[in-house]
Structure formats: C-alpha cells, structure tokens
Amino acid sequence: MQSGYYSSAAGMVTQFNRLDTIANNLANVNTAGFKEDNLIIGDFMRLYKEARDELPNANQTKEAAQFLNRAMNKAPQVVDAYTDFSLGVMQKSDNPLDVALSKEGLFFLVKTPEGLRLSRDGTFTKDDEGKLVTKQGYEVLPSDYLISNQPITFNEGDSAIEIDKNGQILTNVPNSMMLNQVNRLFIAQPDNINLLKKEGDGLYRYDGEGGAEGLVSLDESEAVLQGFVEKSNVNAVKMMTQLIETNRLVGMYQKAMDTQMNDMNRDAIEKLAKKS
C-alpha cells in the first residue's frame, strides 16, 4: 500500500476546501458587515483519538481496528471552521438609514421568510409601505417586536430621521423641528457567538436555546452609529497571500501523487522485471 499517495490526496482535497473558503472571502471583500471565514486543519490520528470513545467497539479489540486506517494517520483533514467576528472599518456615508454597530458580538434582528435572523449589515432603506427593511427587503425589527409583532414604519411626513447610540429612532413632529421617539432598534447580543450559522445575504441563524426568538434587546448598547457602514473585515492582501500559498500546495500535492503512482510504480516494475 502506498500510504504517501493517500496522504497527498487527502492534502489536496483539504487545500481545495481552503480555496473555496478563501474565494468566498475575497468575493465578499466589499460586502457590508461580512465576517471572514477560516478553516482549522488537523490530521486523521488526532480526529480518531478525539472520537474513539464514541466508536461501537472497545479500542483494544480486533474489530475496532477497522475504524483506524493507519495509512491515513498523518493525512491532513479539515477539523473545524470558524468565523472571525472582529470589527470591520466604519465608513461614513451620511445616509440617515445607514446604521453600523461599533462593538463586536452585536446584531440587528430581521424578519425573513425562514424566520427571525441576525445581521451586521445596517445598510437599510424604506419600502413602498414605509417599513424599514434591508437591501434584500427583510423587515428590520424594533426592540418590542416579540411582544407587539409590529415592524418599524415611517410616515410620509417623516422628513428627519435620527438614530441615537442606543438605537432609539426619532422623527420630526409634523410642521415642527421637534423630534419625537417612535421606536428603538432590536440590538441583540447572543450568549454564545459560536452558535451562529451563516445563511447568506449577511444573515445568521442562532442555534442557541430558544433561537433568535429567545434573545433580548439591549436598551443601552451604546454602539449604534447613524450614517456609517461597517465594511467587511476581510483583509484582501492576506487573502491573496493565502490564495497563492494554497495554489502552490495543491501543485506540490499533485506532484507528490504523480511521483507515488507513476514514478515509484514504474521503478518497482522495472526492478522486479530485472530480478525475474
């Protein structure tokens, strides 16, 4: 058995997965609120040691040996994936409906056809009914939504809209320069940020107890910036460096596979033919 061939093949597959992740990060380098994804790469033996207590046979038995392919002991594998939730650059837009969150771990609550979801993308707008919505048309929800089930809606006469650092929304009193508080943004802070799952369109599903419906809105987040957009936290230079590195590794693994399968086999056949 040519164990080197299997290790090289596993390494190539791992780098293909890494390429997909890097390409997705680069594709979203200009996506507001996007958070960089990363992979953790380990080896088969470590994975086996972590999971062997859950195997159906005792580790010492002959039957248990079928779960351990010793040719794959050091083959690289994707152990886990994680998202870097660090802040992106805050870019001033002067659009009153652009809202950014200046602290990590905070999210807006939005309503989608699949249910309540979290988002960091605060590039909001108004739909034809005056509702505050995301670019995709999902309703941006107020702090009392879980009680009132009502969205954030503006009147035609609301020419001035201000949002303070705690997400309070104020609009002008008709025929007056005075402002009146009409609502507050739902600013959520999940207890365990590792339970967030990306679903596309800048949305996250929260798999914690009770889901997004079990979250509580922060009254004093002191993190809301009106007229700003949080840019992606993807470092394009770092991603391009990783892309080049990964492409080179794929080439190296491919050459190693070719050496194992062709050159070594040919050499072995020629030597055996001479002896016979």
Image (cartoon, rainbow, N blue to C red):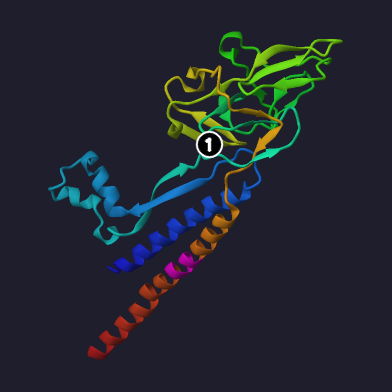
The quadrant of the picture occupied by the C terminus is bottom left
Mark 1 Cα within 10 Å, few/some/many (few <14, many 20+)? some
Q: Which residue is mark 1?
A: 198
**Magenta stretch bounds:** 248-253
Asked whether the viewer can see residue 248, the reply is: yes
Residue at image position (24%, 50%) is: 67
Secondary structure type for disc 1: strand
Q: Position of residue 185 (x, y in %)?
A: 63, 20
Q: Quadrant location of residue 113? A: top right
Most extreme residue toward the bottom, as rendered?
274
Residue at image position (73%, 27%) is: 97
Judge left or right: residue 171 versus residue 120.
Answer: right
Q: Quadrant location of residue 126? A: top right
**Does residue 25 lie above or below 269 as drawn?**
above
Number of labels in the image equals: 1
What is the chief secondary structure element of the magenta stretch?
helix
Most extreme residue toward the right, as rendered?
175
**Does residue 112 lie above or below 28 as drawn?**
above
Q: Position of residue 53 (x, y in %)?
A: 21, 40
In magenta segment, residue 151: no
Q: Position of residue 160 (x, y in %)?
A: 79, 20
Residue in front for this viewpoint, 184 or 131? 184
**Does residue 99 lie above or below 130 as drawn?**
below
The quadrant of the picture occupied by the N terminus is bottom left
Amino acid type at mark 1: Lys
Residue at image position (63%, 17%) is: 142
In magenta segment, residue 249: yes
Asked whether the viewer can see residue 153, the reply is: no
Q: Position of residue 188 (x, y in %)?
A: 53, 23
Judge left or right: residue 189 versus residue 148.
Answer: left
**Does residue 12 lie above or below 51 as drawn?**
below
